[in-house]
Amino acid sequence: MAMCVEDRISSFPDHILFHILSFLPIKEAVRTSIISTKWRYLFASISTIKFDGSLMSGLTDRNVDSFKNFVDRLLKFPDQVSLDCFGLNDNVSWNDKDHDFDVSGWICAALCRGVKEIDLDLNNLGNTLPALLFTCHSLVTLKLDAVGSEIKVPSDVCLGNLKTLQLRNSVLFGDSIHRLISNCHVLEYLAFIECGFDNISEVNIQSPSLKRLVLEFDVTEGRYFNYVVVINAPILVYFQYHAAVAASYTLSTMKSLEKADISIYQFDSINSETSATHLIQGICNVRSLSLTTDAAIFLTSRLPIFHNLIEFKYLGVGFNGRETWLVEFLHCVPNLKTLTLNFPDDAGTRWKALCMKVPSCLSFHFKEIEISYFDPRMIEMVSYFLDNAMVLEKLKISTAALTWSQKWGAQIKLLQLLKRSKKSLIVIL
């Protein structure tokens, strides 16, 4: 006798089924329409609509029109539920002349349905965005990848409920940055990733509500960043800055800053050392700092005391005098507890020859040291820390980059150092 399997899922209330469908790719959500009469039009009421290039695979010129009509009906039918998210990913050219998709109309339809998040990755995006996008009060998250095109910010921009703004591969002109940010009154997360700026003398970011800021500018050798970076974000808790050194920096006191990730590179600029110093001075309240440099790019003698810093990670290529520079920096962080070092060593490094006072953090506060990508020439550095870190509890050294013979020899030397130090440590090799 055949068993009758009860369809319990179909008995769920519609709002639960809509929620389940929202986790499926749109193509799979539409396929559920064949399950039963109840499911036939459920997909039309899903709250997350994302299109990517996979939908275009297999389409011919004959059924492109049918596809366009389907999208129009899906977005523009009356009495539809409000949208949580609308997205287009440009694995194909949604807005090229060959297909003539009404991308701008689709965006407007999503906006009219009170969409909360828009995520667009499109070629020629700057020519596609409707002005309505910049005055939509329902938007909470806006992510735009413009693939090198200009983002035109209208003068009447007002995104009163926007909390997350991410621009990638975009070009911004004049005062469009300041105009855009100043009209996002509850903005909490802001990211400019691989963006360019034309006809601009100042990157001006002022937001009393901003909590997380990511600035990753294209670092091209020989390109001088001749603009000023101004940041006034009093409750910022996370700051990421990856770029060449700008002409100058004006950073307000970031009293709430918990974590900073700074990667700076100097090119041929007479002010790069002073500018970089101003940048580091502006984050002196940070508790956790990751720093990447290609040289001793800022003046330790002009740095304030980082009283709150308890975690420091340094990454960078080798440069002459690096050990002196690092010890000088450690004098500025009296309460540091955790140090992570990730850089190549060279034959010019001489830790034994250091004639400097041992930093107080090393003597009284260091609990954990991690050395990534250990090189046998770093034995002197390890010896320096073991000799001077009086309260050290944990030492982690990665030898993964070494050959088996190098690793064996390095481990023997490290164990000899550890035995000599007579410290009770948790050691991870």
Image (cartoon, helix red, strand yellow):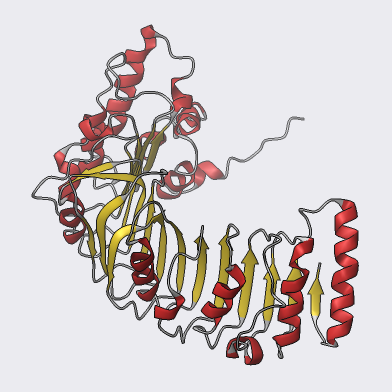
One can see residue 78 in this view: no
Q: Nearer the viewer, residue 79 or 207?
A: 207
Image coords of residue 304 (percent x, y):
40, 83
Q: Is residue 342 left or right of residue 24?
A: right
Q: Which residue is rendered at x = 34% and y = 48% of the image?
A: 84
Image coords of residue 325 (percent x, y):
54, 73
Q: Residue furthest left?
A: 156
Q: Is residue 187 above or below residue 404?
A: below
Q: Is residue 359 left or right of residue 31?
A: right
One can see residue 209 in this view: yes
Quadrant containing the C terminus in the rendered view: bottom right
Image coords of residue 99 (percent x, y):
31, 16
Q: Is residue 89 above or below residue 286?
A: above
Q: Which residue is rendered at x = 69% and y = 71% of the image?
A: 350
Q: Is residue 364 above or below residue 291?
A: below
Q: Nearer the viewer, residue 370 or 30?
A: 370
Image coords of residue 206 (percent x, y):
22, 66
Q: Which residue is rendered at x = 61% and y = 85% of the image?
A: 356
Q: Is residue 81 left or right of residue 30?
A: left
- The image shows a total of numbered marks equal to 0
- Residue 144, quarter of picture: top left
Q: Nearer the viewer, residue 330 or 214?
A: 330
Q: Nearer the viewer, residue 80 or 7?
A: 80
- Residue 204, quarter of picture: bottom left
Quadrant containing the N terminus in the rendered view: top right
Q: Is residue 131 left or right of residue 119?
A: left
- Residue 151, quarter of picture: top left
